[in-house]
Image (cartoon, helix red, strand yellow):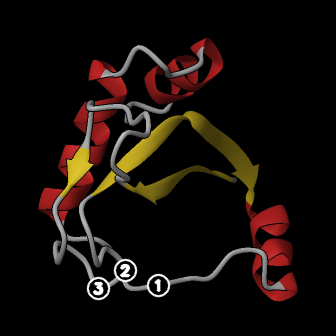
Amino acid sequence: MSVLVVNISSIKPSAFFDPACVLQSGCHPFVTQDSWVVYRGATVLKVPRLEAKIAAGDVRPDHPVTQQVYNQVRLGFDASDLVAAKISRYLRRHGI
């Protein structure tokens, strides 16, 4: 089994961000200022590798997102020009 992973980064003045999915401050406890989904860095991890990253402290689990935030992030995969072809194939193959 595998999971699709994306990073979320705070929007900084005068710095590039992908406008395909902007998350408003407060939409999730983790999002404390307006942020963007870093689609160009999306990756697929096998579950054991994700568990190892969590155990090593490289990944910090947090509260699940709401369905609304999930839908917003998912739609951004279709809107962003920065999604790698292999990630688009993963989404199609898994019906996501």
Local crowd at mark 3 within 10 Å, few (<14), some, or many (≥20)?
A: few
Residue type for callout 2: Phe
Q: Which residue is mark 3?
A: 29
**Quarter of the figure with residue 69:** bottom left
User: Which residue is located at x 83 percent, y 67 percent?
Assistant: 48
Q: Locate the C terminus by quadrant.
A: top left
- The residue nearer to you, when weighing 26 against 48, is 26
Residue farthest to the front, as pictured: 14
Q: In the image, residue 66 lies at what x, y percent?
A: 19, 70
- Which of label 1 and label 3 is nearer to you? 3
Q: Are marks 1 and 2 in contact (CB under 8 Å)?
A: yes
User: Which residue is located at x 26 percent, y 40 percent?
Assistant: 21
Q: Which residue is mark 2?
A: 30
Q: Earlier in the sequence, mark 1 or mark 2?
A: 2
Determine whether 53 is above or below 24 in the image: below
Residue type for callout 1: Asp
Residue type for callout 3: Pro
Q: Are marks 1 and 3 in contact (CB under 8 Å)?
A: yes
Give the alpha-carbon distance from disc 3 to disc 2, as whole Å.
Answer: 4 Å
Label annotation for residue 62: 1
Give SS at disc 3: loop
